[in-house]
Amino acid sequence: MISNRRRSDWSDCKGAAATLFILLFTPVLARAESVGAWAKTRIEIKAAHKAAKALVSPNVTPKERLRVEQIYYQLVRDNPQSVPAQNALAAFLWKNGKAEAAVLHWLTVQRLEPKNAEAANSLGGAYLRIGRVREAAEQFLLAVRSESDNPDYHFDLANVEFLFRSDLTAAWKINSAELLQRALFQFREASRLAPTDPEYARAYAETFYGVPNPDWNEAQVAWQHYLEVSRNRNFAYLQLARVTLKQYKKAEALSFLDKISDSSFSGVKEKLRKQAEAIGVSTGATP
């Protein structure tokens, strides 16, 4: 028979155990609800994207376009703290010519998640479009730092560093040579992370022509990679001939020139051939 004292102790133990169970299980429930909400938002985003795909038809009416836009806006109204939802709406607005509204939602993303790479890269593109080069570059740099395994982000940063170096040397207080080396590194990273992309391979290889004191052996490796991933083999052979001539590799250069079959390259091909033939005869020829 259980005494009143023991019965009271047992009740206290059960109460404590129940409290402990609630305390332990509450975070699990919260996480489950969070995961459920996240999954629901993802489904809604996919549904909005599916609706947006229909807008590519030339027969879409303004009313139909507005209806899809409202789907995205409703998505954000239902999930105002959702970064994916805000990014989805911003991307839709940008694609449909509403740049200012898109920027506002990307800025909202940055308030919610300051290091969100998608918003940073998108803002970089938006700022570049209106000539705000320094801010564009800073956003591209943030995107790379936040998601360093994304080749597109490296490529965008490399392009702005290379093409707008005159703007950035003053803004960042670095010289042009250093900025070009930074661009070369970013192009290399883009190509490394997307090794089958011919555009990234070509951009990396071509950048060697613009940097001071280039490593022509590395340039040859880069053009060889481009040859492997591109269908434009004649162009690749031409560039391989150029960079091997820079290294005074006469036999290799002539071998690459012999592989060029496209007649449109005949003029430059013959010019390079003469330079190759001059190696060992005259040091005056510059490839």
Image (tube, rainbow, N blue to C red):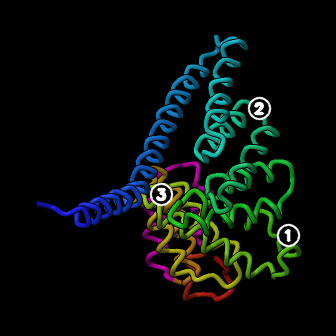
Q: Amino acid at mark 2?
A: Gly
Residue at image coords 51%, 81%: 217
- The image quarter containing residue 142 is bottom right
Q: Which numbered disc flags the more N-terminal residue, 1 or 2?
A: 2
The residue indicated by pointer 2 is: 97
Task: Provide the residue span drawn in magenta.
Answer: 249-274
Task: Name the disc covering residue 166, or none.
Answer: 1
> How much space separates mark 3 and mark 1, taking CA atoms?
37 Å
The residue indicated by pointer 3 is: 260
Is residue 272 found inside the magenta-colored segment of the image? yes
Is residue 183 found inside the magenta-colored segment of the image? no
Select label 1 or label 2 by which is in front: 2
Select label 3 or label 2 by which is in front: 2
x and y, in percent, of residue 92 in the image: 66, 34
Q: Amino acid at mark 3?
A: Ile
Q: Which numbered disc flags the more N-terminal residue, 3 or 2?
A: 2
Select label 3 or label 1 by which is in front: 1
**Callout 3: helix, strand or loop?**
loop
Residue at image coords 28%, 66%: 9
Q: Is residue 228 left or right of residue 174?
A: left
> How much space separates mark 1 and mark 2, taking CA atoms?
30 Å
Residue closest to the far left:
1
